[in-house]
Image: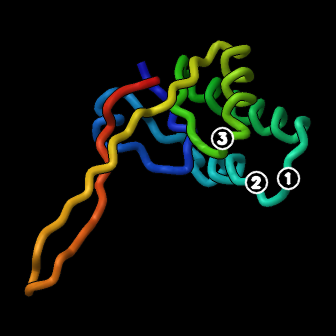
Amino acid sequence: MSILNLTKNVALPKQIELGVIEPKDKLEIISLLTFHELPTNKDMIARAIKLSNISIAHNVEKAMIGGPEFFMCTLEHVLMENGVKPLHAFVKKVVNEFVIDNRVVVYNTYEHIGWV
C-alpha cells in the first residue's frame, strides 16, 4: 500500500522502503504548504481539500503530512473526511562528526523511526 508524501521534503530511504511515494507534481504540494500571509480558515480548508484531492488522484489510503503546525489539524480532518489516513513521521536527527585535515566537519542526517 502506498503512502503519498504531502510534505515539502523528499522521502527518506526508509520511508520509501515502507511505501512512501512522491506526488507527480511536488512543486504544487510545496506551494499548497507555503503560506506567505496570515491564512483565513477558508483558505486553509481550500488548500487542505486540494491536497486531499491530490491524494485521492494518486489512489492512496494514507498520506505522510508535515508543514506549518497551524495547518496540520485542518489537513488531518479533511484527509480523514475523504478516507485518507494522515501519518506524521517520527524522525531522529543524527549528528555526524569527523576530522579532515585537522578540521572538524559536522553534518546532519535523518533516520525514520516510525509513524505517529
Instruction: Kindly identify the residue that appears in the image at 55 percent across and 43 percent down.
Output: 7
Residue 94 vs 82, above or below: the answer is below
Relative to 78, is 24 on the left or the right? left
Query: Which mark identifies residue 67?
Result: none
- Residue 24, percent from left and from top: 55, 43
Asked if disc 2 and disc 1 are in contact, CB closer than 8 Å, the reply is yes
Q: Residue 79, located in which quarter of the rendered image?
A: top right
Q: CA distance from mark 3 to mark 2?
A: 12 Å
Report which residue position mark 2 lands on. Answer: 35
Name the amino acid type tagged 3.
Glu
Which secondary structure, mark 2? loop
Q: Earlier in the sequence, mark 3 or mark 2?
A: 2
Which secondary structure, mark 3? helix
Name the amino acid type tagged 1.
Leu
Instruction: Kindly identify the residue that appears in the image at 51 percent across and 32 percent down.
Output: 64
Name the amino acid type tagged 2.
Phe
